[in-house]
Image (cartoon, helix red, strand yellow):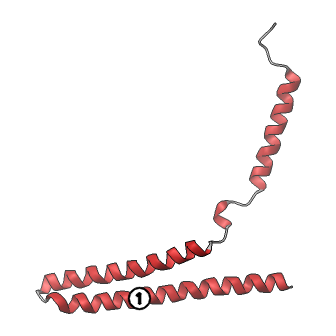
Amino acid sequence: MTNEPDKAQLEALSERIEGLKKTALAEKPRGDEHYSGAQQGWRMVTELVAGLGIGFSIGYGLDWLFGTLPIFLVLFTLLGFAAGVNVMLRTAKEVQNEHEAKAASEKD
């Protein structure tokens, strides 16, 4: 008994591997997939929290710098909230436009 593999089996195996590589390359990459509803929701929550956090940080920093603790903190926290809501609305409009375009393409 020899330990050498059969050449025909090796060739068949390498052909199968090459075929699988070609089909794997033909599939869409993950980056092209559309976001699920949960992912879009978390994106919007993150945008809102980031706006609040940035506004809070700027306000607290200015209050600490000038010694006027509640004034800039409240002002910039509200501005950060408004900016976060604005970005959330822009994201929601973007998602809505994508859904409308998809529905229109399926209709045709």
In the image as oriented, which residue stretches furthest toward the left?
A: 67
How packed is label 1: few (under 14 Cα within 10 Å), some, or many (20 or more)? Answer: some
Q: Estimate the x, y position of residue 105 in percent, counting from the top left.
A: 80, 82
Label total for image:
1
Q: Estimate the x, y position of residue 53 in percent, counting from the top left.
A: 33, 78
Q: Estimate the x, y position of residue 3 in percent, counting from the top left.
A: 77, 12
Q: Which amino acid does label 1 sit on?
A: Ala
Asked which quadrant contains residue 95, the reply is bottom right
In the image as oriented, which residue stretches furthest toward the front?
A: 38
Asked which quadrant contains residue 60, the reply is bottom left
Q: Which residue is drawn at 39% across and 77% down?
A: 50
Q: Residue at x 89, y 24 (%)?
A: 8
Element class at badge 1: helix
Q: In this view, does 13 lie above or below 79?
A: above
Look at mark 1 in the image and give the residue it sits on.
Answer: 83
Q: In this view, does 62 lie to the left or right of 94?
A: left
Q: Which of 87 and 37 is in front in this view?
A: 37
In the image as oriented, which residue stretches furthest toward the top?
A: 1
Q: Which residue is drawn at 15% across and 87% down?
A: 69
Q: In this view, does 10 lie to the left or right of 44?
A: right
